[in-house]
């Protein structure tokens, strides 16, 4: 390939990466400019332009992809300021989706041997392995939209101070959440009676049968679960009365949350919860989601605590 | 102490900020890309061809430059010149540059002696 062929090939590679209406014009100009540069190089070297000289010139101009990009306005999909946050959320989301998929795969197929474990891993990979890429794809759309909006309306990205007192407890909000969790705990204590209360005793016998606890769960695991749930609720009751968080109560909250998550995980893995298979599966799925959500919430609380410690101003 | 690599990167950043104004300063009359690059190099401001030629296009698309094709007995070449808006922009940038230059001179004179 001689020097002219190299220049022609380079110009063609740059041009095809440009918008159609710009292509011919830029190609014509670039070809002339590169030939001018090549002639100057040849004159300086005191010999006719050759392949080596052309290669050196084109290497200096940069790969066609980069050269073509320089001819167009800069395009940023995700703002550089968002890049690390994007990586964190994308990586964390992928880990959570894979974990959920793994738990679901273990629930679908009982494990009795090493071969079963391999089969579960294969099921897991086929069901959520590469498919997990929908999550970063969705994030790219969200972050790109946010970047677009910020460019169009710069005031939307302006900094706003956080709520002044972050230790104050919103009593109304906590009471509403507390009422919801108390109802959930009552359902857990006696789901059959709650069904009777809701339906006025008109539910089919099969419905009552669906909510009969597994005997082993009822005797051994349910008391622990109930005890810690009541303890956690009582703790929130105390906090509503006190009206403020302090470092100690925040640590107690995290410790209680972690303990409840550990007991729920034990409940999930130790055996059946309900005698009826469909109710058991549905409840385990719900508990899995609760554990994952709680762990995400706890990790955020821990991170906030850590930042409070490390960012505390000097006395 | 900053090593040679750090110096090269930081110096490149310094120079990058001056490329547009340097190019505009030489475009009060029609010039084509290679001629402009030679002119800048002769005056002590060498700019890589891969940077300068696309920059001319971008400045033209922003309305700072206008261009026309000319042959003048040789191959067809695209000649660039400051537009009316480009001349105003050039004046404002020049004013900013001089103000910045004066500020930097004062800062560098004051920072000549580093305390340990």
Image: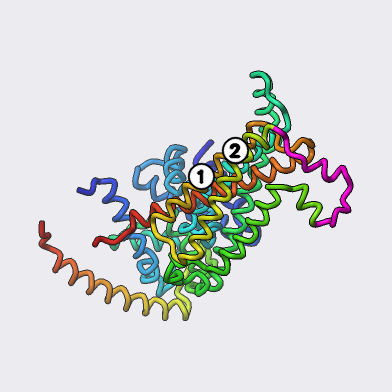
Along the polypeptide, which appears first: circle 1 or circle 2? Answer: 1
In the rendered image, the vertical position of residue B57 relative to residue B12, given as above or below: below
Say which residue label 2 marks.
A265
Q: Residue at horizontal 14%, vertical 68%? A: B109
Q: Is residue A314 left or right of residue A275?
A: left
Q: Residue at horizontal 53%, vertical 66%? A: B70
Front one among A108 and B110: A108
Dot 1: what SS? Answer: helix
User: Total marks drawn?
Assistant: 2
- Residue A213 is one of the magenta-drawn residues: yes
Callout 2: 10 Å neighbours few (<14), some, many (20+)? Answer: some
Where residue A87 appears, as percent x and y from the top left, is: 51, 49
- C-alpha separation, residue under disc 1 versus residue under disc 2: 10 Å
**In this orientation, does residue A11 appear?**
no
Dot 2: what SS? Answer: helix
Where residue A76 appears, as percent x and y from the top left, is: 53, 59
Say which residue label 1 marks.
A258
In the rendered image, the vertical position of residue A267 relative to residue A300, given as above or below: above
Where residue A146 appears, as percent x and y from the top left, is: 57, 63
Q: Is residue B55 left or right of residue A195?
A: left
- Residue B63 is one of the magenta-drawn residues: no
Q: Quadrant of the C terminus of chain A?
A: bottom left
Q: Is residue A139 left or right of residue A278?
A: left
Front one among B115 and A59: B115
Q: What chain does mark 2 sit on?
A: A
Colouring method of the image: rainbow
Q: Which residues are magenta?
A: A198-215
**In this orientation, does residue A270 appear?**
yes
Q: Quadrant of the N terminus of chain A?
A: top right
Where residue A122 appears, as percent x and y from the top left, is: 68, 28
Q: Residue at horizontal 78%, vertical 43%? A: A211
């Amino acid at each position: 390939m001689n020097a002219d062929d190299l220049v022609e090939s380079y110009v063609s590679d740059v041009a095809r990466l440009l918008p159609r209406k710009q292509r011919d014009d830029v190609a014509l100009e670039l070809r002339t400019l590169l030939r001018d540069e090549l002639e100057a190089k040849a004159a300086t070297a005191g010999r006719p332009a050759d392949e080596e000289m052309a290669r050196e010139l084109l290497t200096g101009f940069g790969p066609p992809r980069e050269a073509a990009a320089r001819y167009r306005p800069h395009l940023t999909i995700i703002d550089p300021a968002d890049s690390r946050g994007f990586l964190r959320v994308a990586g964390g989301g992928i880990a959570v989706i894979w974990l959920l998929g793994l738990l679901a795969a273990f629930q679908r197929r009982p494990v009795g041997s090493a071969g079963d474990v391999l089969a579960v891993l294969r099921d897991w990979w086929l069901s959520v392995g590469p498919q997990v890429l929908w999550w970063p794809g969705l994030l790219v759309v969200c972050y790109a939209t946010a970047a677009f909006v910020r460019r169009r309306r710069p005031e939307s990205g302006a900094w706003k101070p956080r709520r002044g007192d972050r230790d104050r407890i919103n009593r109304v909000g906590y009471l509403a959440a507390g009422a919801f969790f108390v109802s959930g705990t009552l359902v857990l204590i006696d789901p059959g009676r709650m069904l009777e209360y809701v339906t006025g005793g008109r539910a089919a016998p099969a419905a009552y049968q669906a909510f009969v606890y597994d005997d082993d769960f009822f005797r051994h695991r349910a008391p622990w679960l109930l005890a810690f749930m009541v303890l956690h609720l009582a703790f929130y009751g105390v906090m509503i009365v006190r009206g403020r968080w302090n470092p100690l109560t925040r640590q107690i909250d995290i410790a209680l949350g972690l303990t409840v998550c550990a007991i729920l995980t034990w409940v999930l893995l130790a055996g059946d919860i309900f005698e009826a298979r469909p109710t058991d599966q549905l409840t385990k799925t719900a508990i899995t989601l609760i554990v994952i959500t709680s762990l995400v919430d706890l990790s955020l609380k821990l991170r906030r605590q850590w930042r409070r410690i490390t960012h505390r101003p000097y006395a | 102490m900053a090593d040679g690599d750090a110096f090269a990167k930081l110096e490149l950043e310094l120079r990058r900020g001056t490329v547009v104004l340097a190019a505009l300063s030489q475009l009060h009359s029609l010039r084509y890309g290679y001629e402009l690059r030679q002119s800048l190099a002769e005056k002590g401001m060498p700019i890589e061809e891969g940077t300068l030629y696309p920059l001319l296009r971008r400045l033209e698309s922003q309305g700072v430059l206008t261009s026309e094709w000319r042959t003048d007995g040789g191959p067809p070449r695209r000649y660039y010149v400051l537009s009316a808006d480009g001349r105003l922009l050039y004046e404002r940038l020049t004013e900013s540059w001089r103000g910045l230059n004066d500020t930097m001179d004062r800062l560098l004179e004051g920072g000549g002696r580093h305390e340990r």
